[in-house]
Amino acid sequence: MHIPDNYLSPSTCVVMAAAMVPVWAVSVKKVKKEVTKSKMPLLGIGAAFSFLMMMFNVPLPGGTTGHAVGGTLLGALLGPYAACIAVSVALLIQALLFGDGGILSFGANCFNMAFVLPFVGYFIYKFIKDRTKSTTGEYIGLGVGAYFGINAAALCAAVEFGLQPLLFHNAAGQALYSPYPLSVSIPAMTIPHLLVAGPVEVLFAIVIFAFVKKTSPGVLYEGKPKRTKPVIGLIAALICLTPIGLLATGTAWGEWGTDEISKVMSGGVSLGYTPSGMANGFSWKALMPDYTVAGMPEVVGYILSAVVGVALLVITFKLISNMKRNDCGESGSAA
């Protein structure tokens, strides 16, 4: 679901980034008001969960791959506004350091995964939880919210892809950017997420939520013990397990390189050309592209990338916490 650079036109990227500006502004304002200094580092832990979940690629129908995001999980743990900030920072580090998702398309990726996903997922979760008022209802709400949240995000990405050939093409009718119309992009994105990526998102959300609720209930409820060691231990375990994501072969739909896209088959026919906007577009050289490290085995590079990404996220939010004044109001419970 990470849209690379040059799949969306520059004007589309500007529109999507502009749409995120007020979302980020309101989210920052809400987080500053509602999240206490002592809880601010939890955003780093939440961002780390999201970052790691996105490294666990799973095979999808059609020979592509996908992953969970954890937006609804973070919404349930921290609230939707904090989830928006946490996922946005995770996406920024992925784009800058690992080349996962584009620089120009950062706003679009945040719109889909840091705005649509956590807000849709959270409000479904909250709606069901508040009306059932039981532990079972809470988990049902989380599962339903996670499922619909990631599928809503996938649908948004599909629409963004599919509008490109309609709006941006040359005189010969060839697409300048993403070449697949809505009739192709919507089923190609939504069906695999409905069948596989959605259930994976639900599984991650419920398992991690249950673990946090049992081992560190203070993350969710005021006045309860807030132990971070078990949560840090879970993050360490996930880091060690990230190479499982390497077992899923193939490229995620809509993330092909310029050397691949002309040969991609759709309806039994290859595209046959590389859109000029993609071939001559913006290029960013990431330090650890695709979570690899030059000269290291792929598995070692993947684990090291996970360590670096998690460390940067935790440090970033720790620094923000250190700059935050102590006179912040008490945080409202996300649950």
Image (spheres, rainbow, N blue to C red):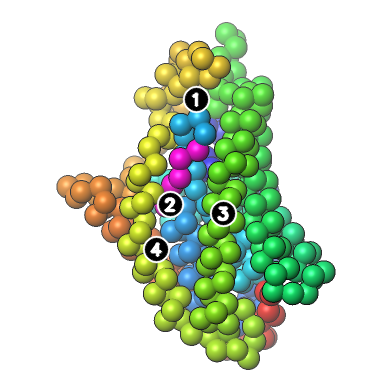
N-terminal of the two: label 4 or label 3? 3
- Residue 101 in view here: no
Q: Nearer the viewer, residue 35 or 260?
A: 260
Please give the residue where the numbered disc 1 appears in the rendered image.
277
Q: Are marks 4 and 3 in contact (CB under 8 Å)?
A: no
Please give the residue where the numbered disc 2 appears in the rendered image.
56
Relative side of 10 to 329, left or right: left
N-terminal of the two: label 1 or label 2? 2
Tell me the residue at 52%/34% (across/down). 61
In the picture, the quarter occupied by the C terminus is bottom right
Q: Nearer the viewer, mark 3 or mark 1?
A: 3
Q: CA distance from mark 3 to mark 1?
A: 33 Å
Residue 245's mark?
A: none
Rendered location of residue 58, percent (x, y)? 45, 45
Q: Nearer the viewer, mark 1 or mark 4?
A: 4
Q: Is residue 217 above or below residue 57?
A: below
Q: Quadrant of residue 164?
A: top right
Tag 4's secondary structure?
helix
Rendered location of residue 206, percent (x, y)? 58, 64
Magenta range is 55-60
Tell me the residue at 66%/26% (across/down). 182
Please give the residue where the numbered disc 3 appears in the rendered image.
201
Q: Is residue 58 magenta?
A: yes
N-terminal of the two: label 3 or label 2? 2
Q: CA distance from mark 4 to mark 2?
A: 9 Å
